Amino acid sequence: MLPSRRTLLRITGCLAAAAAVRVLTAEDTVAPATAPRAAPPAAGPQAAVPPVRASAYRLEPMTAYTPPRYHTALPPVRTRPFLSMPQLGERSMVLTFDDGPDPRYTPGILKTLREHDVRAVFFLCGEMATDNRDLLREMRDDGHVVGNHTWTHPQLNKTPSAQIRSEIGRTSEVIEQTLGEPPQWFRAPYGAWNRNVFEIQAEMGMEPLAWTVDTLDWTTPGTPTIISRVLEGAAPGVVVLSHDAGGDRSQSVAALRSYLPELLKQGYELKVPPRRR
Ligand SMILES: [Zn+2]
């Protein structure tokens, strides 16, 4: 019996899809050659399509987290994090909020940002993210950038490699499962990067972002002090560090309500880094 028209169409469609996947996979193995690294990237989700370079693929160690198949290129292994982002524009600044999300404080921050139509970067801890996935979706829907800040906030320069991999990999997994895209930015807790951390985060497709102005809001210095630290530190390209979790962050929430409209009044544009494709 001849196959029906519908079956033929289905077969044609499958062949086309398989061809498309093969092209993307081939590009994927070529692209990272521009990155200064010895090894090719860890294999992507591999079940359906055999890898192009099977031998190299087999030599790759298994990792807790496998990077996405459709990235264009992995970032290079950095030797220090970005401290500022002047490339975002002459009057640009970046607001970042770490350690969350926390349902007690993050919604207040999101509300203020929304009222002023401003985007920020949230560096999430996996253990907080996994229980507050609605807040992740809210961040995504409002156009904020969601970054990786490890699972439990350890000091990574005192943490064994396998554990670093797990801390970062599990967090990226939760973010990707929830938002459909893995994070592209990583911030080491306490700013404690070392070579190992730079290598692992690059392998997982992330760039390192530190900060220019530390509000030290976690010491609960009082709302006016947090406000004045931001306004005194304000300058083009400055990245501001605050926290929306990890303790009582009501001062951080209140301070934002005050310094954000002031920064806008001074002509600053609050921006986030664009997504790499
Ligand atoms: Zn932190």
Image (spheres, rainbow, N blue to C red):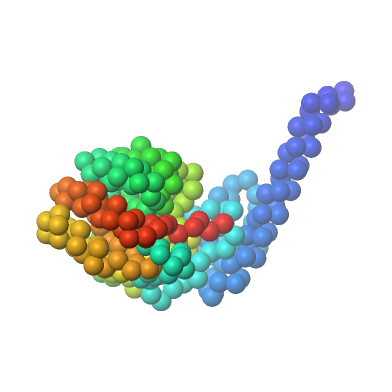
Quadrant into which the N terminus falls: top right
Quadrant of the rendering where the C terminus is positioned:
bottom right
Give x and y (percent) for residue 209. 38, 65
Inspect this view and state whether residue 62 appears. Answer: no
Task: Please name the residue shown 39% across and 51% down the image.
Answer: 119
| Residue placed most toward the observer, 92 or 6 | 92
Residue at (50% x, 71% y) in the render: 76
Task: Say which residue appears at 34% left-offset and 64% top-offset.
Answer: 239
Q: Is residue 35 above or below residue 20?
A: below
Give the quarter of the image for residue 163: bottom left
User: In this orientation, does residue 86 appear?
Assistant: yes
| Number of marks present in the image shown | 0
User: Can you give x and y, in whole percent of width and height, for residue 211 in the image?
Assistant: 32, 67
Image point (76%, 32%), residue name: 10
Task: Give 256 or 75, whichever is nearer the viewer.
Answer: 256
| Left or right: residue 218 compared with residue 59 | left
> What is the x, y in percent for residue 121?
37, 54
* Along the viewing direction, whichever of 276 and 256 lies nearer the viewer: 256
Farthest residue to the right: give it. 2
Q: Quadrant of residue 215?
A: bottom left
Residue 173 lies, in percent from the top left, at 42, 49
